[in-house]
Image: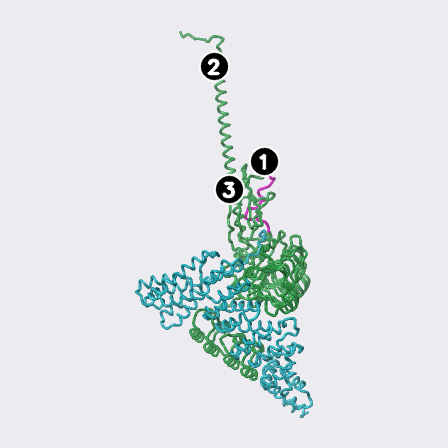
Chain colours: A cyan, B green
Amino acid sequence: MPGLVLLLALGPGVRAQDAPRRTPAQQVEAILAEVRRSSDVGAAAGQLARIGAQAVEPLLEKLSTGQESVPTRAAILAALAQMSPEQVLGFLASLARPLAPEPRRLAGLDLLARFGGSADLRLVFELGSPSEADAPPSPELQRALEAALAGILSREPGAARALADSFTRVPPAHQAAIVAVLAPRPGREALAALADLLGRASVETDALILYAIGTTARSQAPASDLAALERVRLYLAHPDARLVVLASTAAAALQDAGGVPDLIVLLEDGRANVRGAVHGSLQALTGVRLPAEADAWLAWLDEGLAWWNDRSDDCRAVIVSGDPQDAATAIHEVARQRLFVHEVAPLLALAARRPEPDLARSALRALSALPEPFARATLRALVAQADPELAEHARQALEGLQAGPRENRTLPRLPQLRSIP
Amino acid sequence: MRTRFLPAPERRGSALVFSVMSVMVVSILAAGFLQLSMSVTRRLNVYSDTQQAINLAEAGLAEAYSGLAVARTGNVGTMEAPAVLGGGLLWVEAEHHASGLVELECTAMYGTGRATLGLVCEPVGLGVASLGFFTDEDLRLNPDVRLDSYDSKVSTYADQLNTALNNKGSIGSNGDVSVASGNTIMGDIVYGPTGQLSVASGSVITGGSSARPEEEVLPPVVVPDIPLQKAVKYTGGIPMVVPPGQAGYAGLDIGKNSTLILKGPLDLVVNSLILRLGAKLEFDTTNGPVQLFVNESLDFSTSSVVSTSTQVTSDSLIFVAAPEGKSVNFGAKSQFYGFIYAPNADVHISAQYELYGGLVCKELQLAAQGKMHYDLSLGATLSGQLPILHSWRVVELPQQVAARRIDPFQLLGLDPNDLLPPAQSHQDQVLDVRYVDTSGRTTSYFGLESEFDWSQVGSLLYGVRDGIAFYLPEDYALSGDVANDPLVDLVDSSLSSKQLRDALLAASPCSTEALVAACLRDPPMSQSDLKSVLDANDPLAPQTLLSAVTSPSLDSSALKDVLLDNSPLPTEVLDAVLLRNPPLSPSDLTKVLTIQ
């Protein structure tokens, strides 16, 4: 009896160690059976780690069932984290074959998502390969693959280059995974990385990349990576209407005001979808509400180009150093420009720094009236600058912008009831 | 001596004749004048009666017209039981046209006066989605089904679970409704005019039930005229993207584990749409709605997945124009935020296809344990909006009314004392009201309006006729269960990260809502600012910790510090840490796990 009490007092780990005839799987089972609360995790992880490489397989087996409790799962992961990478990776490499059970490969990818590095990218792709050659990976495997790549990318941002390099060598489903993990990265990096992938695989891949650019760029400040913008613009001339529409949507999402002339030319395209998408993009980029007719937009373009050729430099000079009356006229003139809005906003920001309060306010008002992303980006920059009075005015203008009406969207119309029921 | 001259005998009596003639002339003249006078009087009376009848007809039209603004049908009284007003009677007939226009015709009778006036107006559009969950045929629910409601304009479904807004579901049919055991119906049931409601034991219905006054006519699906490309069988590993605009396919067959992305604004017409095993369909409505029109068949296999990028239910619409007798199968795993309209189809929905929005179809087979959550924002809310008036005209009198110009009550054999005034003569409807009665007690009523006594209503809180809200106070959506912590407003303001940090530190200890909002703020707070705020509010509630785990402000190291300060962590937080994407760095994760 005292012996039993002593055995109980020694705790589960000691009991497990004191059973030398047990296989590693049994030891793992015994230790995990004692993990019931969060407070059991630390001790159990240490005991599991001490079992060594032989514990990897049963631990992964346990993970792959997906039935374990949260503390158990935490203990397994903590144990695997404490083992040497060679012990774990060695076992994972044995799973990198299509016939390996998918749950185990999922568990392996989960592990790599937490602890993997850029050196493990190949292993990640191998584990994420579909079980059947003629079909893409299952949704679960694809999700696990994306999570593993995202995990590695978050720890080692430099792995993006390696991913891009491997883009043409991996199967289409893995290309989709690479696009999915590159897209949510911070603004410029994502755009550059995604634009760099354009044209390197199939048309379907290009469509996905343009779609990803259009989706992720929407909530960000106007892009300034000219090379990337240029790559997207190239697709405006693509023979496939789907790609042209997606490129047009991406151009609008990127706030590529420099691409407006290319878009206007497309208003003469024979494909209705292209014309519709381009018209929407033009309205979003310029804030101008002209009908979807090429002539009207071309006339507007000519007028705008003439202003930029003949008047923009003079206006800039007057805004910077002209007398107040001339500056007021110049601000008024600049404020009316909607071609190349990305160039208009800095001019108005210059005007907002004029010492005359009236002129500064007038410039801020004009800024607020620009298409929202440009106005927002410029006003945010002004809020952060040193002059407290200007910063306060800019902050107020920014708040006005935030309180303003939301973007107009196409509203669906449901069938109407014949009668009030 | 006076001499008397006597007339000659042959002239004797001529004065009398003359007198008689004079009297006769006068009499004739008098009779003529009397006739003239009576004729003028009669004409004046007819004119007056006609004017009065016109006035009554105008009043009747006004009653019906303003009734349309409060979800009335526009029908006021009938020829058999007209409304009585000012000594005359009237009735209004409403004809609803497919174009959405409503033609009102009011016939009024007063004395000998008759008038029929008509007007054409356009009531505020009521989409079919206002019917909630509705079937044209009998609706038989399988066991353990949950049908309830929420308002997507207020917050998410999860936030509104077990609140008042969760309890306003609308389940309807033109036929019978059978509620099986284990069903939870959070709301009202309106079955067909000749239908019945059967309720099995063990089921819960929180609202009322009633027959609808008349059958609902479901308008056909109008499929846009989009040319169809040849059928596509897609089995690629790269998701197939259908760009914004219009597109049409004779068929779309998405193969095993392949993905189809529909990027809105998009109108897509397909003859058939199939999602195979593991296939995925994404409605990307970030830039605009996706309207999917299916001409013939739709089959989402049980292991396919359907998702929507937003929770705006009016942005993802599926219209099934399949001919009579066709069945469509929504077997996919989905939390579908949208509306499905299939007026001629038999719709099968699996238990794993959880629908947030609405569904109107011919027949519904909702699997046992299925869940559907009606989005109240899809429903019509009239709130007293008057219809748009298009035209007004005098209409030719109906034959049976024009024929005999006698007292209308005598003509129609009616006793004016038996008739009701126009305001009480509207066509009967199902009324759902919540009100404070004259004794100050808040109570509600659900049933036919004819059986409701409006005089007991002190003030109205909420009113619906036939499922259409006609009275909602402005703060209806915000009242009650929605938190309104001023610190949350502060977090959502345009304050800089630093200013917000100072404000929150000054207000500490902050509410959990404010800390959650700070963690999830867009644009995010800077890492150091958020960490200062969280540190000042230790120990953190599990909800705050969950938000910290997903916060874009905190990197792996900062999050680790927060988690270590609040260890041991509740299980759900530990679970969220393990599921975090991107994951904590290996060393941080190890530290967090080993300290538990």
Name the residue that disc number 2 marks. B15
Tell me: B483 left or right of B400. Answer: left
User: Is residue A218 depicted above or below A26 in this figure?
Assistant: above
Query: Residue B424: within the magenta?
Result: yes
Most foreground residue, B28 or B108: B108
Q: Which residue does the numbered mark 3 point to in the structure image?
A: B55
Marks 2 and 1: in contact by CB < 8 Å? no
Q: Chain of mark 1?
A: B
Q: Judge if badges 1 and 2 mark residues of a common chain.
A: yes
Could you tell me the amino acid type at mark 3?
A: Asn
In 3D space, how far apart are the residues under numbered discs 1 and 3 (Cα atoms)? Answer: 21 Å
Residue A106 versus residue A238 in the image, above or below: below
The residue under label 1 is B403
Name the N-terminal-most of marks 1 and 3.
Answer: 3
Residue A216 horizontal/vertical position (percent):
51, 69
Q: Are marks 3 and 2 in contact (CB under 8 Å)?
A: no
